[in-house]
Image: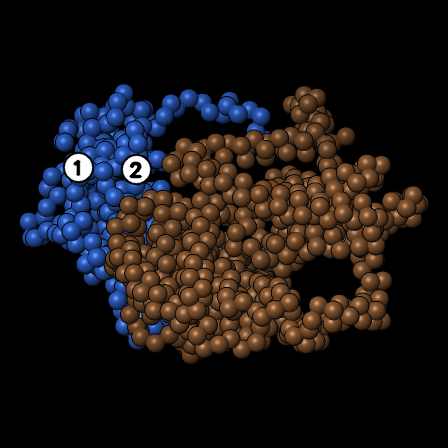
Amino acid sequence: MARINGARIDNAGMDGAQQALATGGGLLSPLARAQYAALARLRWRVFVNGLRSKLGAFELGARVVAYVMYGILGLGLGAGAGAIAYSLADSQNWQYSPIVFWVVCLIWQVVPIMLASFQEQFDLSSLLRFPVGFRSFFLLYVVFGLSDLSTIIGGLCCFGILVGVTAARPDLFVWTALILAIFAAFNILMVRAVFAWIDRWLSQRKTREILGAIFMVLILSMQLMNPAVWQHGHRASGKRQQQQIQQMLASPWVKTANEVQEWLPPGLAGVALRQAASQQPAPALGSLGVLGLFVVAAGSVLGLRLRAEYHGENLGAAPALKKSAKNSAKAVPVREKTAEREGDWRFGGSGPIAAIIEKEIRSLLRTLPLLYAVGAPLVLVLVISGSFIRGASRGPAPLVAFPLCVFFAQIGFRMLFSNNLGTEGAGIQLYFLSPTPMRTVMLAKNLLHSAVFVVVLVIAGLLATLRLGEPGAVVVAATIAWLLFVLPCNLAVGNIFSLTMPYRINPGRISRQRGSQASTLLSLLLQVGVLAVGALVFELCSIGGMMWLTVPIFLALTVVAVFVWLRILGNSDDIASQHKDLLIATLMKAD
Amino acid sequence: MQTSPGNFQSSFRRPASTPALIQTPTLLFLPHMEFAAIQTHGLTRRFGEFTAVDGVTFSVAPGQFFGFLGPNGAGKSTTIKMLTGLLEPSAGTIEILGKPFSASALDLKRQIGVVPEGMALFGRLTAPEYLRFVGRMYGLDRETTNQRTQELLEFMQLANETRKLVTDFSHGMQKKLALAAAVIHGPRVLFLDEPFEGVDAIAAGMLKAMLQGMINRGATIFLTTHVLEIVERLCSHVAIIHQGRLVANGPLEELRAGVASTLPGAQSAQRLTLEEIFLSIVGAGDQQDLSQELSWLA
């Protein structure tokens, strides 16, 4: 027994309860449970205290509306999944059940990638200063992410499948519930593991470049695969198309792919359900066991990443420190080394606008969430163009296919436009301290963001052209005119949101960002608004057979939008001055 | 407001009420000065019902090294934020270099340098990138900015860290960088909010020498810090704020003499440290034996 100055210290100064708290270390130990309760209370107090301000109350309202929207979206998808599940169960077509699970799995895993800029999660890394066990940290990480969009939609899809199967075959309720619970556990762990590792890979230049290259290869592969799979699909008749599909399904590679998918989680879930429906409990349990192994594997992959974080890994610091160590080893003379940096690329001009643009480019290239948010929606172009290609096999592709594909690529700019001060951190003070007016700061940011907007949309246009074929000149002109209208709308509204509803962006992470549901929701409404205006103009002009008329209409709207943008830009200093306290307090908050 | 030092009770005892202002009017306007470097009148800032700064009036002459002291939460940072344009005053006026701040904000911002509470750094830039950015935000041309960036990095001993992001700097390095950024445009008035916090002894000595050099060349420095030894060594004039009100203002020697005269037994003013003056003015709290408190601490 340890002693200090002759006194036993095993229970000195502690009563029974305190001792139990101090000695526990398990997942459900008294200490861990006390920590869960404290964290829950902390979140509750943060929530209640947030309501003290008008913005906080507005934020709550926006959150409620957002979750209702997510719920409606999830219910729609869930109802669809339920209807398909009912149909398959009722007609005993269990061989197709893996398709339903694959679709749900894809939605679960892809939705967060598509809507990266709308995600918001609680960062638990601040808990590491407390005596939180790793298993508790892991559990909290998983539990605190359960309110995200993908889990809500995925969960509602699973519920739909449960209802659908049970309605057709009530005897399968327990089996279906069990299968879906394990399937959901896999998805919850997998999506977190994917994001945790993407954070890790994108934090270092080399792995970032490798990941970028893989992404490009993936996109090019999809371009090559597309004509291979849908050969002449555009002009095929219904019968001919059916024959093509039958031929494709009969081909050896499809059979192999089917055999392989049966050993992957969605396939295993479908197979387990089929086996349970065929009164084969032992094989069904076997399939479930393999599915359980996938859950363990996904958990382990996530755990591997979280353990590094738990042991104090700092993604932001690690690469830079290594470089620094290398540098000091070289012992290059100080003046020489500084001069070496002078040779770096620089943006032309020496005024504040050039300085801000130069600084913004550097910051953007080093800010993962923004890079990701801007780049990830390009995947949407592939998905949306894919849906048009399949639709086109039954007739000509609609005129709006090209503009819609390009429009969706700009969704990622929401974070850039509507929170353009989010990455400034404590640097926001400099804008108020320096003699540069806030309108100059906003103008510089708007100019750069417009340039990035153009570059991304040109890439999106090229991708859409590769997928859909070359669009007509009028369609291209109409699309450009529409986007010319969308850009100042985004800039104008974005400047107001940036100055009145800012939130801090952690530049080193893609996942676990704080956010503002109010800003998210309102900017989403803006997107819906400009989309609706675009759809209305396209529809009216195409009905009248005067597509060319869209161009002058959009250009007229652009003039109005530019005028509004300039007015808001001119008032930036007043708006910033009115919200100075909020801007500084919010953006300087520690991560 | 001006009162005699006799209002103070004995040293190390909290005054019964908020202490009255000790002010030495001779220092407010030196005869050869046309205008004060910093002048406030009735400066007030309210946050809802709470008044953080309450009718603060003081003046800092050009070339002064002015120490602005106060306990935690007294209103120091709020005052400095109002003086530098980071916070709007609820009432009162501010004049910097003879011009009203509200009317000539952009012009005055070119002539002042600030190390604010949060340091105003951009974490995703390197130190040279940050200094070059700040220089250009203050309107310096590229060549001058580059030259000064290099000189400042060497002076601040940061030239070996040119590839490291600011976010990866230690706290002390960030303070040095913030100070370098505050002076890159050669300000006539420098506002420093806790500039020595987290800075090592070698760097602190170097910074003190730099600040003293600026004073010798005619700059005015407004400094807030909790390190009273630094104020004692550097500052010629001191003001003390307590619970949002200015309770002392004047040359250090006069404050020393004023406080010494209130002490029992007419203690020698020369022997009084700034810490004793400070504690005497803002109150030292109940000087009971604290060793018996928090007995569960190791």
Q: Which chain is blue?
A: B
Left or right? Give the position of A139 relative to B12. Answer: right
Q: Where's residue A129, x and y in %?
A: 59, 42
Residue A417: percent from the left, percent from the top? 41, 58
Residue at screen point 30% across, 37% down = B75
The subunit carrying tag 2 is: B
Seen at 60% across and 54% down, the residue is: A112
Instruction: Residue B229: name its quadrant.
Output: top left
Give the residue pinned by disc 1: B42
A371 vs A477, left or right, is: right
Q: Mark 2 highlights which residue?
A: B75
x and y percentages locating residue A271 in the rendered image:
84, 52
Near-viewer residue (A40 or A388): A388
The tally of labels here is 2
Image quarter of the N terminus of chain A: top right
Q: Would you identify the image quadrant in which residue A325 lies?
A: bottom right
The brown-tinted chain is A
Q: Residues within 10 Å of mark 1 (few under 14, many from 20)?
A: some
Q: Chain of mark 1?
A: B
